[in-house]
């Protein structure tokens, strides 16, 4: 359903409240709240372990203010330590390698799923300037989209 989504990934709000027309501060606040709830609903041991993947929807400073501990992004490449020697340390290293790889894949999947939800809730016209001509939103994060929307439409004037 969400591309990289692992089986069993479920959000508290499977479909976000759609924003009909131009986003407003009120609709942006609701969108942020729903995305935050979904991000929290997928467990992670990072950033204190109490706030799931909330770091995907909040800035680093905002996350730190809530969790009181930084969320360090899982490494993109899990590696075996050069000190591992046969046989027990290698088995242990293999388990750690597979766990790190799985954690990173989950992190990517949650980010992709949240981004897909946001893009479904907001008309493309309000975020199109972030899209790459060939890659569309592949290199844009959910945080990038939220920052753009809040800067453009979420401020009370």
Image (cartoon, rainbow, N blue to C red):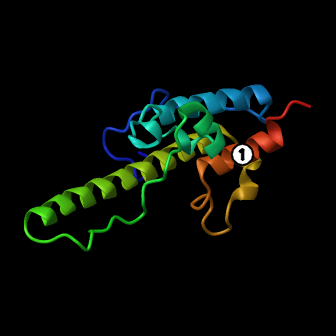
* Quadrant of the drawing holding the C terminus: top right
Who is closer to the viewer here, 4 or 108?
Answer: 108
Position of residue 48 in the picture relative to residue 57 (left or right):
left
How far from the left and from the top, in percent, is residue 155?
A: 83, 34
The residue wearing badge 1 is: 147
Task: Name the secondary structure under disc 1.
Answer: helix
Q: Quadrant of residue 24?
A: top right
Residue at x-position 67% and y-position 48%: 145
Taking 65 as reference, is 119 above or below it? below
How far from the left and from the top, in percent, is residue 91?
A: 13, 61
Taking 41 as reference, is 98 above or below it? below
Taking 58 as reference, is 82 above or below it? below
Residue ranking furthest to the front: 83
Residue at x-position 31% and y-position 68%: 79
Q: Quadrant of residue 33?
A: top right
Residue ranking furthest to the left: 87
* Quadrant of the drawing holding the N terminus: top left
How far from the left and from the top, in percent, is residue 94?
A: 19, 62
Position of residue 5 in the picture relative to residue 145 (left or right):
left
Is residue 99 in view?
A: yes
Task: Please tell me how crowded label 1 is: few (under 14), some (14-19), or many (20+) other residues with Cα within 10 Å.
Answer: some
Position of residue 114 in the picture relative to residue 83 (left or right):
right
How far from the left and from the top, in percent, is residue 30?
A: 66, 26
Who is closer to the viewer here, 77 or 29?
Answer: 77
Is residue 59 in view?
A: no
């Amino acid at each position: 359903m969400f591309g990289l989504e692992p089986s069993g990934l479920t959000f508290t709000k499977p479909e976000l409240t759609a924003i009909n027309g131009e986003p407003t501060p009120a609709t942006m606040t609701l969108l942020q709240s729903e995305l935050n709830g979904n991000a929290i609903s997928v467990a992670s041991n990072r950033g204190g372990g109490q706030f799931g993947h909330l770091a995907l929807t909040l800035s680093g400073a905002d996350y730190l203010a809530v969790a009181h501990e930084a969320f360090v992004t899982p490494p993109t490449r899990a590696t075996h330590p050069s000190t591992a020697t046969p046989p027990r340390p290698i088995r242990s290293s293999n388990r750690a390698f597979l766990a790190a790889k799985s954690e990173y894949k989950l992190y990517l999947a949650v980010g992709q799923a949240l981004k897909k939800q946001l893009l479904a809730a907001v008309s493309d016209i309000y975020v199109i300037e972030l899209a790459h001509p060939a890659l569309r939103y592949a290199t844009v994060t959910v945080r990038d989209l939220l920052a753009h929307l809040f800067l453009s439409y979420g401020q009370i004037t």
